[in-house]
Image (cartoon, rainbow, N blue to C red):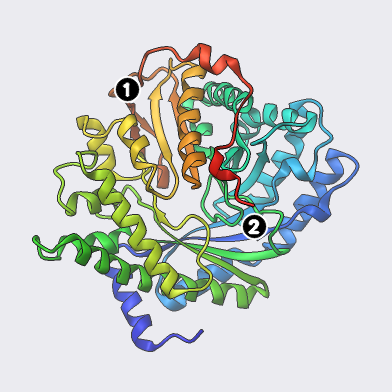
């Protein structure tokens, strides 16, 4: 694909004035040839492959960013789900050398995060995956860059409620193990319904088994660009015209991201995978999905009508990206993480945005309940019930939904939890205090909906 000088100059203008960046260039890497008889041998094979394949990733991406004048915020690696690479463990602690080897390799090649400490347990578990899930709290608490995810539900399989209950327990355990850092390990963990195999964003990235040996996936973030355009549009412009404006911007953003991704793949000698155009906010003022929603006509994000506005935004982003590239994938839409979005943080502080309203908004956005801080005394069963609700939205609507929730140890409603960097800070939000324990303790599986029978 050829790009004109005018397109490149327009991208540079968006970069300088409107917070456009390439949020991540993510190397997806298969580890299926790293399976060995012991965890120590597997860990060494995994370490060697990561360091060999990703040795030039960071310097190459930095060079491209400097040449094009386009900031690349993060460099990441996505791995084959580790529970598939080594499934012989019978106790969680057996897997910790593998987790630490992955984290050390990520540090040596200089990436910001490495994902794929993951398991697909949406229909059931093996003895090996049970041990793997048990390993997650200590693996995330004792590493710096490692990210983890669990697939708990799909439209075709239903919801594994035994796994949902266990996930609530390990989230509480992760929070306690990183109590001095506000429960930071929980920010590196996410659980999914309908997880996708080419998502370049952490914490949920993993390299699916249907993917090539090694690919370059790109996530472009452009909420600042869209926010700037929406705020400067006529105040009385009808919503279909606003949708068209956002669609045109998304087209340009996608082209910019694909330019970087294809050039990185060429220089690294790898395949180009996908471009994920997800409006992913940061704590920087203006670089905010919440501000886009407010600019469309709301006093605060979370006001009545916000879900409809988010539906417009998500759909326009997807349409613009689909016109710009035949390689659009990942999640592609709009993220609504509370801690990473200044307007969402303020809305939560003022009570305009509640967990229940966020849950409604997840039915039309890219993912789900993202970076939500709740009181530290929230029970594991309540967390599991929140997860179950979000999994149900994904299952019934045949879309990806997720939960990244932090029960902040020692914190109560109204307190602020500081995570730093792109993770920002999160106000502790109130949780419904009525007990869902009997429902969660039933376990079993919520069957797939009737519309899953599509063969």
Q: Is residue 305 above or below residue 431?
A: below
| 100 lies left or right of 393 | right
Other residues around mark 1 within 10 Å, as few (<14) / some (14–19) / many (≥20)? some
The tag earlier along the polypeptide, 2 or 1, is 2
Find out whether the residues at labels 2 and 1 contact each other: C-beta distance under 8 Å: no
User: In front: 355, or 27?
Assistant: 355
| SS state under label 2 | helix
Q: Position of residue 278 (x, y in %)?
A: 42, 57
Q: Position of residue 7 (x, y in %)?
A: 36, 82
User: In front: 154, or 270?
Assistant: 154
Residue at 69% across / 29% down in the picture? 135
Residue at 71% across / 64% down in the picture? 212
| SS state under label 1 | loop
Q: Position of residue 365 (x, y in %)?
A: 38, 48
| 356 lies left or right of 152 | left
Label of residue 109 in the image: 2
| 413 lies left or right of 273 | left
Q: Position of residue 354 (x, y in %)?
A: 29, 30
Quarter where residue 235 is shown = bottom left
User: Which of the two marks, 2 or 1, is nearer to us in this view?
Assistant: 1
Q: Which residue is mark 1?
A: 430
Query: Please, which residue is most extreme toward the right here?
Result: 37
User: In front: 412, or 333?
Assistant: 333
| 443 lies left or right of 24 | right
Residue at 59% across / 57% down in the picture? 198
Gap in angstroms between the C-alphas marked 2 and 1 = 40 Å
């Amino acid at each position: 694909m050829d790009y004109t000088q005018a397109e490149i100059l327009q991208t540079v203008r968006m970069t300088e004035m409107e917070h456009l960046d390439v949020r991540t260039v993510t190397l997806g890497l298969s580890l299926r040839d790293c399976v060995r008889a012991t965890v120590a041998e597997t860990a060494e094979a995994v370490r060697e492959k990561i360091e060999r394949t990703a040795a030039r990733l960071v310097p190459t991406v930095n060079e491209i960013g400097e040449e094009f004048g386009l900031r690349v915020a993060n460099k990441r690696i996505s791995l084959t789900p580790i529970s598939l690479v080594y499934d012989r463990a019978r106790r969680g602690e057996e897997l910790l050398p593998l987790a630490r080897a992955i984290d050390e390799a990520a540090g040596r090649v200089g990436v910001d995060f490495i994902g794929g400490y993951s398991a697909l347990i949406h229909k059931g578990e093996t003895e090996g995956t049970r041990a793997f899930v048990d390993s997650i709290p200590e693996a995330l608490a004792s590493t710096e860059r490692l990210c983890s995810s669990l697939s708990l539900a799909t439209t075709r399989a239903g919801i594994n409620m035994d796994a949902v209950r266990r996930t609530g327990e390990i989230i509480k355990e992760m929070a306690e193990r990183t109590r001095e850092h506000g429960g930071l390990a929980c920010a590196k963990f996410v659980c999914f319904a309908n997880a996708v195999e080419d998502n370049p964003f952490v914490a949920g990235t993993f390299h699916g088994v249907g993917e090539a040996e090694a690919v370059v996936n790109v996530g472009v973030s452009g909420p600042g660009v869209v926010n700037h355009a929406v705020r400067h549009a006529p105040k009385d412009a009808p919503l279909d015209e606003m949708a068209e404006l956002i669609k045109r911007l998304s087209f340009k953003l996608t082209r910019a991201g694909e330019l970087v991704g294809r050039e990185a793949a060429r220089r690294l000698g790898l395949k180009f995978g996908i471009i994920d155009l997800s409006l992913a906010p940061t704590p920087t003022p203006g670089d905010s999905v919440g501000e886009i929603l407010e600019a469309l006509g709301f006093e605060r994000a979370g006001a009545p009508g916000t879900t409809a506005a988010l539906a417009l935004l998500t759909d326009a982003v997807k349409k613009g990206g689909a016109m710009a590239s035949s390689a659009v994938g990942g999640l592609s839409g709009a993220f609504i993480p509370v801690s990473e979005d200044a307007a969402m943080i303020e809305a939560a502080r003022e009570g305009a945005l509640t967990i229940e309203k966020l849950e409604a908004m997840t039915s039309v956005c890219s993912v789900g309940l993202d970076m939500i801080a709740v009181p530290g005394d929230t029970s594991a069963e309540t967390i599991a019930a929140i997860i179950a609700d979000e999994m149900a939205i994904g299952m019934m609507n045949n879309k990806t939904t997720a939960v990244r929730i932090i029960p902040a140890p020692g914190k109560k409603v109204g307190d602020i939890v500081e995570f730093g960097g792109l993770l920002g800070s999160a106000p502790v939000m109130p949780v419904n205090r009525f007990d869902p324990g009997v429902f969660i303790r039933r376990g079993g599986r919520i069957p797939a909906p009737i519309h899953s029978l599509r063969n």
